[in-house]
Image (spheres, rainbow, N blue to C red):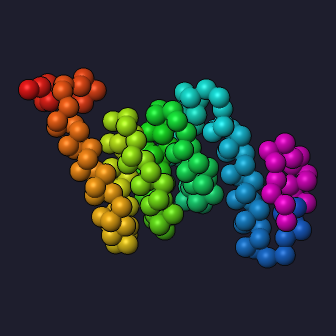
């Protein structure tokens, strides 16, 4: 069974679904077509960061558990973009996806570890929130984060405390000396 493209005609989709031998194959075929059409609608691969951000917000807010399961690898791929806006939106989307499908948490531990090394404060804050959610869902994630991230996070905190005033870390004047 081949995955469908969004340009496939309806008649071909119906034939492919009818050709499935089991109900599980039918559900898988329909799920793949739904994910494919949602991807083309949401346009997670667009060149404009704002369109990708809007697509990620829509996905995080409206997807079902099945769609979340199918589209999680695509959102995880967006974590590796250099644009902090896309990284933040993808991380926020993953927070919502993990709440809908908790068993995806184990796949996200390593990508989140790499996010904790980012310099952008917004990406770092949201990555820490995702770490917190993953630790609440999975004890193994907590141990992995303790081993891999403690030194990194302590270094980040030291840098924030020891560096001179930076306006991006200011919260209503709370960081002023």
- In the displayed image of the protein, which residue is found farthest to the bottom? 22
| Quarter holding residue 119 | top left
Residue 98 position, x and y percent, is 46, 58
Q: Can residue 137 be seen in this view?
A: no
Question: Residue 136 location in percent, x, y?
Answer: 32, 64
The quadrant of the rendering that contains the C terminus is top left
Image location of residue 31, percent across then percent down: 70, 59
Foreground pick, 130 / 162:
162
**Residue 12, how many percent across, how many down?**
91, 53
Asked whether 46 or 65 is in front, the reply is 46
Q: Quadrant of residue 123?
A: top left
The residue stretch that appears in magenta = 1-15
Asked if 52 appears above or below 111 in the picture, the reply is: above
Residue beneath the point at 51% across and 32% down: 83
Q: Which residue is drawn at 23% across and 39% down?
A: 159
Q: In this view, does 13 lie above or below 20?
A: above
How many discs mark residues in the rendered view? 0
Q: Is the magenta stretch mostly helix, strand or loop?
A: loop
| Residue toward you, 165 or 94 | 165
Image quadrant occupied by the N terminus: bottom right
Residue at horizontal 28%, vertical 58%?
Answer: 150
Residue positioned most to the left: 177
| Magenta stretch: includes residue 49 | no
Can residue 47 be seen here? yes
Residue in view at x 63 percent, y 57 percent: 70
Q: Which of 17 and 112 is in front in this view?
A: 112
Going by the image, does 61 lie left or right of 1? Answer: left
Q: Is residue 14 left or right of residue 85?
A: right
């Amino acid at each position: 069974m081949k995955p469908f493209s969004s340009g496939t005609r309806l008649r071909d989709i119906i034939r492919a679904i009818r050709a499935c031998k089991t109900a599980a194959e039918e559900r898988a075929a329909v799920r793949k077509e739904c994910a494919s059409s949602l991807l083309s609608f949401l346009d997670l691969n667009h060149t404009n960061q704002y369109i990708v951000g809007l697509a990620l917000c829509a996905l995080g807010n409206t997807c079902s558990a099945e769609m979340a399961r199918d589209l999680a690898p695509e959102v995880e791929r967006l974590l590796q973009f250099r644009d902090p806006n896309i990284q933040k939106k993808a991380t926020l989307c993953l927070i919502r996806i993990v709440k809908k499908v908790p068993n995806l948490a184990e796949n996200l531990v390593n990508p989140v570890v790499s996010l904790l090394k980012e310099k952008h404060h917004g990406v770092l804050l949201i990555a820490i929130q995702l770490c917190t959610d993953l630790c609440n869902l999975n004890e193994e994630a907590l141990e992995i984060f303790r081993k891999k991230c403690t030194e990194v996070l302590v270094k980040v905190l030291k840098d924030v405390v020891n560096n001179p005033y930076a306006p991006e870390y200011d919260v209503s004047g709370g960081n002023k000396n």
